[in-house]
Amino acid sequence: MKTFSILTLGCKVNQYESEAMKELFEKNQYVEVDKETDVADVYIVNTCTVTNLSDRKSRQYIRRAKRENPDAIVAVVGCYSQVSPKEVESLEDVDIIIGTSERERIVELCENYKKDQGKINIVRSLKGDREFQKIKTTREHIMTRSYMKVQDGCNRFCSYCIIPYARGEIRSRTIEDSLAEAKVLAKAGYKEIVLTGIHIGSYGKDLGDKRLIDLIEAIGKVQGIERIRLSSVEPVIITDEFMERAIETKKLCDHFHLSLQSGSNKILKAMNRRYTREEYMEKCQIIRKYMPYAGLTTDIIVGFPTETDEDFNDSLDLVEKVKFSKIHVFKYSKRKGTPAASMKNQVDGNIKIERSEKLLETNDRLMEEFIEKNKNRSLKVLFEERKGDYYEGYTTNYIRCKLKTQEELKNKIINVKIKGVEKEEAEVEKED
């Protein structure tokens, strides 16, 4: 019996790609083993390189794999490999190095390594690469919602971000190919698809006249798919036309993760974010005009170089005005190879901690306020898994809910009402 284990770091795109690689191994008669308790013949380390800490974690995963089985094949794939292929190749424990393309060859390369016993490095430059890599998945562990990668690459070059160098230029999956996978997922029983990519707001710009809303409309017509959710998008895609067409599908969830990063115009400019705080708030108002109870979630970086107390207070002020339902807070961390790493006036670590804590306190309050706002409304929850006496799932606007029940509710959409709030979770009861 041939066995494998996949260790995944990083974003939802990486998780999707790990799932697709898992299917490739299983189709070739490999059996996945428990990464915590069992030893594998092949270890795949799907890396992240967003921060220097991500690189360090990737190296730790690599060493851990070889410790567990010194005779195992260790294949390192993903963003860290793409950005630093020579560094990865120099690691003694690495046998195969693949970047952010050609992962569909992973099984073939492992088999070749068994025969030749020579280190393999197929990382290639992504410059000029305009082809979307067709690695896909037909199912995931939770048979309720599935991530579907529809876009790769980024042309934005934010000053703190290494990802454009790791993922290359924007490449979009065709609507036809996306639809084919959506139909397979619907047939497998999925009710919700989460459209994901490195910068999905740029979807279609390389396909001529197609845009993200065209893809949403097409998938919305697939029988069996009842919900379409978007992963992180930039505010630029939000227009009246986008929202009108989105509502018409009756499928797009009223939940938008709009990356903010800072509420200060000075810092946004230094980050090369290409919008102002005023433009960002205008986009949020457009969403709420069409979807009054929409969940708005975001990312904010604190302690970016040159950020003053006044700049940070601008972020706090914007947060209060928008009333986010959840904020992901990150303390700025230098990333070698990005313009921000060499900027002057780096912010002291203790100040970053203090600002992070303030934002997190605000986040806790706003999350509870958002759930309270949704009390007495009829909400549809797609239930995903049982935890003790409760079944848990999410509303369309991304409130995590728990229902006390002995019924089997996996992959069922039930109308509920909120009866209690506990931090970021709502206890609900079935609607009469």
Image (cartoon, helix red, strand yellow):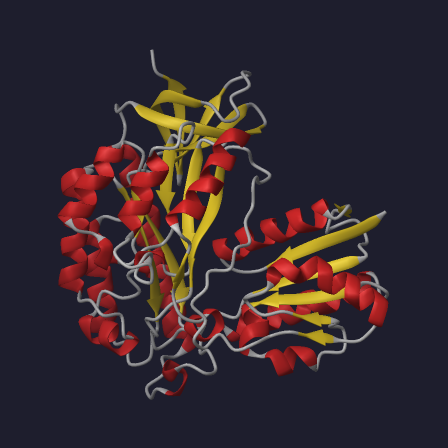
Q: Is residue 242 visible?
A: yes
Using the image, determine if residue 27 lies above or below residue 187.
Answer: below
Relative side of 45 to 366, left or right? right
- Which percent across, then down, holds residue 253? 32, 38
Is residue 367 at least partly visible in the picture? no
Say which quadrant the C terminus sits in. Answer: top left
Write the residue at 81% across / 54% down.
39
Residue 196 at what x, y percent from top left? 42, 51
Horizontal side of residue 123 vs 250, given as left or right: right
Closer-to-camera residue (307/382):
382
Give me the residue at 39% from left, 19% from top.
429
Q: 366 or 192: which is nearer to us?
A: 192
Q: Is residue 171 left or right of residue 204?
A: right
Can you give x and y, in whole percent of width and height, for residue 286 in the image? 15, 47
Where on the picture, by quarter, is residue 124?
A: bottom right
Number of marks in the rendered image: 0
Above or below, 4 relative to 165:
above
271 or 422: which is nearer to us?
A: 271
7 vs 288: above or below: below
Q: Residue at x 29, y 75 (%)?
A: 271
Residue 54 drawn at (x, y percent): 55, 69
